[in-house]
Amino acid sequence: MIKSGMKIQNDVTDLLHIDFPVIMAPMFLVSNEAMMRTAIRNGIMGVFPTLNYRKEGTLDDIINNLHLEILSNDGKPGSFGVNLIVQKSNPLYKKHLDICVARKTPFYITSLGNPEEVILRAHEYGAKVFCDVTNIVHAEKCASLNCDGFIAVGSGAGGHAGPHPNYILVPALKKAFPHIPVVAAGGIATGDALLSMLACGASGVSIGTRFIASEEAGVPMDYKEAVAHYGMEDIIMTERLSGTPCSVINTPAAQKLGTKQNWLEKLMSRNPKTKKYFKMLVNVRGLKKLEDALKPGNYNNLWCAGQSVEMIDDILSCEKIISNLKEETSISYKKLNTQISDH
């Protein structure tokens, strides 16, 4: 239901205590405290990867600070959460989960693994857990573990994109699991795209790439300008960063890196005796490459982004981006109403 003032009320807004069904997607090395604070103040859900805060004490600090931001928001809608890589290849998973639970983080998104422990521990104090899914099989496993919702990661997403377009994946998930909320992720940067996902059955959207080209994003201006100036044809998928296909801008550095693992890497990642440790090694190396690419003066530009770069032309404040999304969605809704008649 779309209310005046461009508030949208549905199962996701009610569940997550937000008044506009947008998740500011968690982005490695991009998401930061300033972005999360803006999300809270503007009635959406801000989510950051715990791996952005690897130094001792920093994860505790940001969670505490964001709880205070919610308190200072005088009960208005708007919240925050964390993204946990639950794969065994994440050496900080257990430690970060313990911190997030101890600090009563209100919302979790799980990626790339079994979310059972996160769901059980989060539910002990009333937190909600949405799971990244790219297909029905994975969704069935998450549903059986009592997840609170799905993040439908479709083709065109930044980072670990799925193989299916969301206009197929979202209705398929709603058909199979009609009572579980679905948030669409991948290729969404405008109000038109947001409204189209609501029409497909999603209760909200997760938007990442649009927020890379923001004033608050913690990345160099070259990265932000690349997001604003490259197009959808410039996004490629590579297995060389994490072992799982990951979407990046097709820079000379990405071309040099390559897109496919070699035969030895594939063998090591599939062998039951070596896969855990090899995947951990690949992840650590990949994260280091992405970190190095963001250092001043580094020309090895490995930049994650989704195909929605096609729709991004400028660098704005996060508040303005959110305001534009609300206005564009309202305009799209009204425009459709003039074209659709019950008679």
Image (cartoon, grey):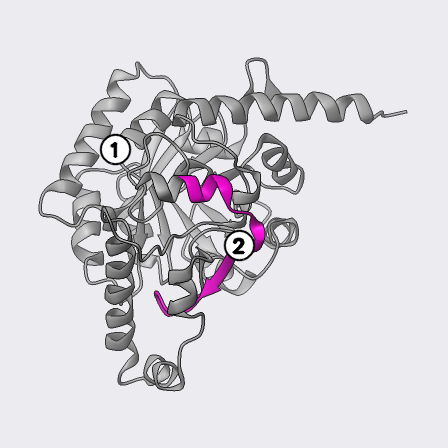
Label 1 packing within 10 angstroms: few (<14), some (14-19), many (20+): some
Residues marked 1 and 2 touching at CB (< 8 Å): no
Q: Is residue 341 left or right of residue 207?
A: right
Q: The residue under label 2 is which amino acid type?
A: Asp
Q: Is residue 260 left or right of residue 6?
A: left
Q: Residue at x 41, y 42 (%)?
A: 25
Q: Which residue is mark 2?
A: 234
How many angstroms separate mark 1 from mark 2 (CA)? Answer: 29 Å
Q: Position of residue 336 (x, y in %)?
A: 74, 27
Rendered position, 141 above or below 265:
above
Q: Which residue is mark 1?
A: 33
Rendered position, 252 above or below 311:
below
Q: Residue at x 57, y 43 (%)?
A: 310
Pick out the residue farthest to the right: 343
**Secondary structure under the numbered disc 2 in the rendered image:** helix
Q: Residue at x 28, y 38 (%)?
A: 218
Q: The residue under label 1 is which amino acid type?
A: Glu
User: Which stretch appears magenta?
Assistant: 225-245
- Looking at the rendered image, the quarter that the N terminus falls into is top right
